[in-house]
Image: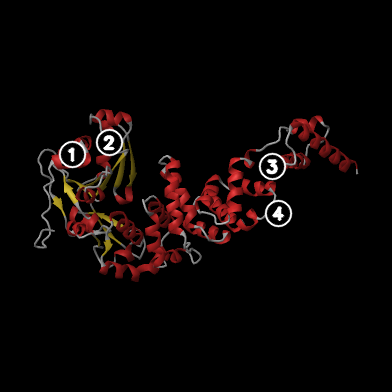
Amino acid sequence: MDSSGKLEQRPAWTRERISAALGESLVRLIATIAKHAHAENAAIYLAGGVVRDLVLQRENTDLDFVLEGDAIAFANKLARIYGGETERHIPFGTAKWKLDSAAINNLSLGSGAIPAQIDFATARTEEYLAPAALPVVEPGLIAQDLLRRDFTVNALALRIEAESCPWDMLNPGKGYSDILGKKIRVLHDRSFIDDPTRMFRAFRFASRFGFAIESGTAEILREAIPVIQRLSGERIRHELDLILREEHPERIIADLSALDIFAQIHAAFRISARSAEQFQRLREHMPKLRGNADETARLGWHLLFSGIAEDDALLICARLGLTGELSSSIAGFARLLEKLGWLGAPASKASAITRFLDGISATALRAALICNIDKHSAKERLELYLADWRHRRSAIDGNELIRAGLAPGPIYREILDKLRDAWIDGEIESQDQEHELFLKLVKEAQAWYRG
C-alpha cells in the first residue's frame, strides 16, 4: 500500500520482469508454447501458483497453462513436435507434458532451470453434485476457470502473447489485493463444502506465505469441518503428504489439530503435544537426508502417529489408504514407542531387544530417535542396536549343521539364533568360543532326537 492507504497498482508484466523472476530459459519456453497456441487461434494463459509467486517474488518453476481450447490435443501436438510424453486425464481435460532430454534439446532453450513436466488444462466450469464429491466439468472461459479455484490468491492468470508485451493479468477474484493484504480468502461460501481438501490447503498456504486466513473464510471453514468425513482416504493422504513436505509442517498440523480436523479423519487420530518439538528435531536431522524429500516425508508420516497405539494406527492407515509397506512401518513405530519401558529395563537382554527391533523398519527406528526418547537407557540401546547389534552374525551356517549330521529342520534356525544371541549378549567373544558352543548345541539336539 502507498502512504494514503490505497492498494498499489499492479506491475507491468514485461518479458524482462518475467525473465528476472523465472529465468530466460523459462521465458523462451513460455514464448514457444504461446507461439504454437496462437497458430491454432487458442488463447493461452499462465495461471495459478506461478503467477501468485511472481507477485510474491518467490521462486517457482512449475508452469501451469490454461487454454480456451483442447489442452490434451495441444499437449500431444507439442510432444509430437519436440519429444517427451504426455499423461492425460480426459475427464478433467488436463494433460502433463513430460520433458525428456531430447525434448529439452529440441526446444533450444539454453542453460537454466527447466521443469520436468508442464501442466495444461482446458478452461472449465465445475458443478459439485454432492459435498466432497469430485466435480462434473464442462469447457468454459478463463474467467470462469479462475473463479472456480480454491482461493483468490490462486485465481490469477497472465494472458501470454507470442510477441507483444507486457502480458495482461486477469484478476477476477481480487486475488492481487489479497496477496498485498496477506490474506487467504475463498471465492464463494460453499467452497469448503464442495471440496473439503481446501481446508488443508488454506492452512498450508497461510503457513508457507505468512498469511492469515480471512475472518469470513475462517468462519466458513469451521462450519464445514464435519464434511471432511466424506472425503476419500486418497484425497486426504495427498493433502497430508503435501503438508509434510512444507518447511514447517508442525505449524499446519497444530492449526488443523486445534480445530479437531484430525479427529474427523478418524476418532483415534490425535496429535502428540510434543509434535512441534519432534518436527523441529526432524528439521535438524534433514541435512543427513541429503535433501531427500521423500524420505523426509516418510519420517514425517511416522511422527504424525507419535503417541497413537498400534491397533489404532493401523485403522488410521487403512482409512488413509497408505501402502502396506508404510502402514507396516508406522505400526512398528507405534509398537516400539509402546515398548520403551521394556527396552530400557536392565533385565532386558540385548539379544531379545535385537530380535524385537529386527522386525521394525529402519525408517521407524530413525523416527523413534527423532522423537527424542526421554528414557536415556532406551535411547542408548536403540543406538547400540543400529550401530552394532543388528550387524552381528554367526560365522557358522547351515552347511556346518549338515556336516555335523543334523537332519534339516527348525532346529537349524534355533541353533543359529542361539549362536547370534550369544555374540550379542557377550557370552562368546571369539571364534573358538563360538565353535565350542556350537558343538554343545549340536550335542543337545542329537540327544533330543534320540530321546
Residue closer to the observer: 58 or 136:
58
Choose the circle earlier in sequence order: 3 or 2.
2
Q: Position of residue 408 (x, y in %)?
A: 78, 37
Left or right of 346: which side holds 58?
Answer: left
Which of labels 3 and 2 is toward the front? 3
Q: Mark 1 to mark 2: distance in Å?
A: 12 Å
Q: On the rendered image, what quadrant is the C terminus found in? A: top right
Mark 4 highlights which residue? 347
First in sequence: mark 1 vs mark 3: 1
Q: Nearer the viewer, residue 311 or 436?
A: 436
Give me the residue at 32% from left, 67% from top.
Answer: 221
- Residue type highlighted by circle 2: Ala
The kind of residue tagged 3 is Ile
Per the image, label 1 sits on a secondary structure element best described as helix
Residue at the location (30% across, 44% down)?
95
What's the CA distance linking mark 4 and mark 3? 15 Å
Q: Secondary structure at mark 4?
A: loop
Closest to the observer: 444 or 34? 444
At 10% from the left and 60% from the top, the residue drawn is 3
Q: Amino acid at mark 1?
A: Ser
Numbered circle sitting on residue 19: 1
What residue would you read off at disc 2? Answer: 113
Q: Are marks 2 and 4 in contact (CB under 8 Å)?
A: no
Under mark 4, the amino acid is Ala
Secondary structure under tag 3 reads: helix
Instruction: Report the Cα–Cα distance between label 2 and label 4.
Output: 58 Å
41 and 377: which is toward the camera = 377
> How far is mark 3 from mark 2, CA to CA?
51 Å
Q: In the rendered structure, are the residues bearing label 1 and label 2 in contact, judged by CB atoms less than 8 Å apart?
A: no
Residue 276 in sight from this viewpoint: yes
Which of the marked residues, 4 or 3, is nearer the chain's N terminus? Answer: 4
Q: Earlier in the sequence, mark 1 or mark 4?
A: 1
